[in-house]
Amino acid sequence: MKHVVYKLFWAWDFEQEEKWLNEMAAKGLLLTDVGVCRYVFQEGAPGEYQYHLEWLQHFPSHPESRAYIQFVEETGAEHVGSFKKWVYFRKKAAEGAFSLFSDLDSRITHFRRITRLIGLLSLGLVGYVGSLASHCLHLGYVPEPYICIFGVYAVMLTLFGIGYFKAFSAYRALKRKRIVQE
């Protein structure tokens, strides 16, 4: 039987999303498709699969990404689906531990990509808010709709700030760990 679940995860919470997918798999709900906050599950054997996701440097249709996905599939994993640059893999739990990050450097690279994404989105948002503020200064007053827009953007910037802090903290912790290991 097919189950559709709507749930929001931020880019910096990918580990929580991965954990949730594995909890769903432990209950016998196997991921078959993903979309914007949308997860499609099919009933199956509880604990049959382990799930992992990764944010690629390019979209899944890019030749480098296709080659990477094929490489992961050659290890026995299955590409379940993609959303933007996120790819979702699963592997039979009976085949042992499943990790896409075989070393510390690949985890560092992953968190650096996420940190850069959030930083760029934040800069774009700040630039847009700045242009709106400039328009208001030119008008000499703040139109009513802009007040709501500024509020929404303030909330978004706060969320991006929290996400950036979380991702950057994880990135720095991994870099420190690498220094200690060397």
Image: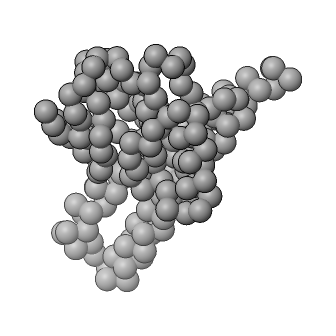
Horizontal side of residue 176 vs 33, given as left or right: right
Q: In which quarter of the image is the C terminus?
A: top right
Q: Residue at x 53, y 25 (%)?
A: 98
Quadrant where the N terminus lies? top left
Q: What residue occupies the far bottom of the structure in this picture? A: 138
Nearer to us in this view, 140 or 36? 36
Residue shown at the point (81%, 20%) measured from the top left:
181
Instruction: Tell me if residue 140 comes above or below residue 27 in the rendering.
Output: below
Residue in the picture at 31% in, 83% down: 139
Tally the marks. Answer: 0
Q: Position of residue 106 (x, y in %)?
A: 67, 37
Q: Which colour scheme is used?
A: one colour
Residue at (44% x, 19% y) in the render: 93
- Looking at the picture, tell me which residue is in the foreground, 151 or 56: 56
Residue 127: x and y in percent read 48, 68
Q: Residue furthest left?
A: 1
In this view, the residue in front, 68 or 155, is 68
Q: In this view, does 115 lie to the left or right of 94?
A: right
* Vertical comparison of 114 with 125: above or below: above
Say which quarter of the image contains residue 43: top left
Q: Residue 150 in the image: x percent, y percent? A: 31, 61
Q: Taking 29 as reference, is 165 above or below it?
A: below
Nearest the viewer among 70 and 144 is 70
Q: Name the residue at the right extreme.
A: 182
The quadrant in which residue 58 appears is bottom right
The reply, left or right, for residue 47 in relation to residue 74 is left
Where does the image place residue 149, in percent across and percent down from the top left?
27, 63
Would residue 122 be seen by someone viewing this image from the given angle? no
Can residue 35 be seen here? The reply is: yes
